[in-house]
């Protein structure tokens, strides 16, 4: 159910409604919007008492059922766009945030060089994997905690908040200690226990779309984050498997429009995993910005040809600088900025 509060409600009056929702056997999720406060009351409506009684409360404007299956992530529950704050960077506002950096953290030199260059070109967050989900167990698995330490050092030097992958529940506390945003990869997009562990760290969660995931399944996976008391969720389109093998994946830009329509959560596009070819990344970024993406996640490497992972799709430092310039007029044309 959605409980909408009246405009002038005090924090005490809001708290009284929250307590009553709990007493009736539901879990309250308070969402403060610019215009109004909405409380999502989640629970089994058949086995609990009726929330309609709240209609009689003076501070309550309305009580209505949530029709959508993806309750808390739906626009029905929260009509305005929500924003996510990751280490001071706001995703979901007018500014399109650019998260750039290598696929994997490989060395101090590689990471620092990339971090300084992407910062100078206008990136607002640094990406880099320390725990890597590799298809083969014989491929580079990432530097682990040493990689996290390097990311923290790069943040210290550049001020760029960090987004990095959380691969296993066992690492949740450790990765959350270093990261400003936790990435859940395509291979783990329906690993619900991992999603719950990520949610419970309280850090923003960037949920990649599973490579064979329908959009509704993706929205419901995201629901696990909000249902576990973490409102800081971002959906990241990174391409899906199709019959087409010219590109590594098929970047589904229609998902940007669909998810923006269905959900209030920010939408991020990762064109690097999406197309798998460095030469195509710039065009995909421009398309994503035009479609209404709130942020881009882009793989950038100082020497892509010698990258330890995803060499074919990483763009170089110069190419990244040019891309940032090319994005400006497109962002402006859709009322945004980069
Ligand atoms: C990555 O961002 O490097 C990555 C492994 O992403 P995905 O899970 O989308 O393949
Ligand atoms: Mn990669």
Image (cartoon, helix red, strand yellow):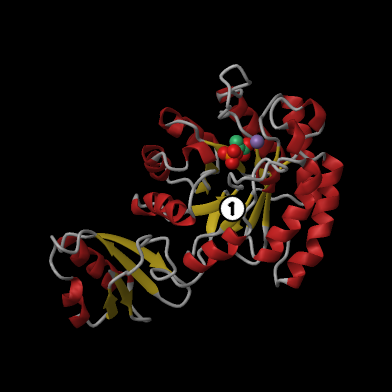
Ligand 2 falls in quadrant:
top right
Residue 270 visible to an observer of this rendering: yes
Residue shown at 81%/44% (left/top)?
279
As drawn, is 264 to the left or to the right of 146?
A: left
Where is 163 relative to 254, above or below?
above
Residue 197 x, y percent position in the rendering: 39, 39
Q: Residue at x 72, y 41 (%)?
A: 158
Residue nearest the observer in this picture, 68 or 329:
68
Dot 1: what SS? loop
Percent x, y of residue 322: 86, 51
Residue 283 in the image, given as x and y percentages of width and height: 78, 54
Outermost residue toward the front in this view: 243
User: How many numbered circles does the render carry?
Assistant: 1
Where is the C terminus found, in terms of image quarters?
bottom right
Left or right: 296 as drawn, with respect to 265: right
Q: Nearer the viewer, residue 172 or 265?
A: 265
Q: Quadrant of the N terminus?
A: bottom left
Where in the figure is residue 184, as x and y percent of width and height? 51, 41
| Residue, far top | 138
Quarter assignment of residue 64: bottom left
Q: Residue at image x 44%, y 34%?
A: 172
Compared with 328, 103 (above or below) is: above
| Depth check, front residue: 97 or 296 | 296
| Point 24% across, 70% down: residue | 17
Q: Name the residue that disc number 1 marks.
A: 88
Q: Does mark 1 have its CB less than 8 Å from ligand 1? A: no
Crowd tier of the residue under label 1, counting other residues whose Cα lies within 10 Å: few below 14, some 14–19, many 20 or above:
few
């Amino acid at each position: 159910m959605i409980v909408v509060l009246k405009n002038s409600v005090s924090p005490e009056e809001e708290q009284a409604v929250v307590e009553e929702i709990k007493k009736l056997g539901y879990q309250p999720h308070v969402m403060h919007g610019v215009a109004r406060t909405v409380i999502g009351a989640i629970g089994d409506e058949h086995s609990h008492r009726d929330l309609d009684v709240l209609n009689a409360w003076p501070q309550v404007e309305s009580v209505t059922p949530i029709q959508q299956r993806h309750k808390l992530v739906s626009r029905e529950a929260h009509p305005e766009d929500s924003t996510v704050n990751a280490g001071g960077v706001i995703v979901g506002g007018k500014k399109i945030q650019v998260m750039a950096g290598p696929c994997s953290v490989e060395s101090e030199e590689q990471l620092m060089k990339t971090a300084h260059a992407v910062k100078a070109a206008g990136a607002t967050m640094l990406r880099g994997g320390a725990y890597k989900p590799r298809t083969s167990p014989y491929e580079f698995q990432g530097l682990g905690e040493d990689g996290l330490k390097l990311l923290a050092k790069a943040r210290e030097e550049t001020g760029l908040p960090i987004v990095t992958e959380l691969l296993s529940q066992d690492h949740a506390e450790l990765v959350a200690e270093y990261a400003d945003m936790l990435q859940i990869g395509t291979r783990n997009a329906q690993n619900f226990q991992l999603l719950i562990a990520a949610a419970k760290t309280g850090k923003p969660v960037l949920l990649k779309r599973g490579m064979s995931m329908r959009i509704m399944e993706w929205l419901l996976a995201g629901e696990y984050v909000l249902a576990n008391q973490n409102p800081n969720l971002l959906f990241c389109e990174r391409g899906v498997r199709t019959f087409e093998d010219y590109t590594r994946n098929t970047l589904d830009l229609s998902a940007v429009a669909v998810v923006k329509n269905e959900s209030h959560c920010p939408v991020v596009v990762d064109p690097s995993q999406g197309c798998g070819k460095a030469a195509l990344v710039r065009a995909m970024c421009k398309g994503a910005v035009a479609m209404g993406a709130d942020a881009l996640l882009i793989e950038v490497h100082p020497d892509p040809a010698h990258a330890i992972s995803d060499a074919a799709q990483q763009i170089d430092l110069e190419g990244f600088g040019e891309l940032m310039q090319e994005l400006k007029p497109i962002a402006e044309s859709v009322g945004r900025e980069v």
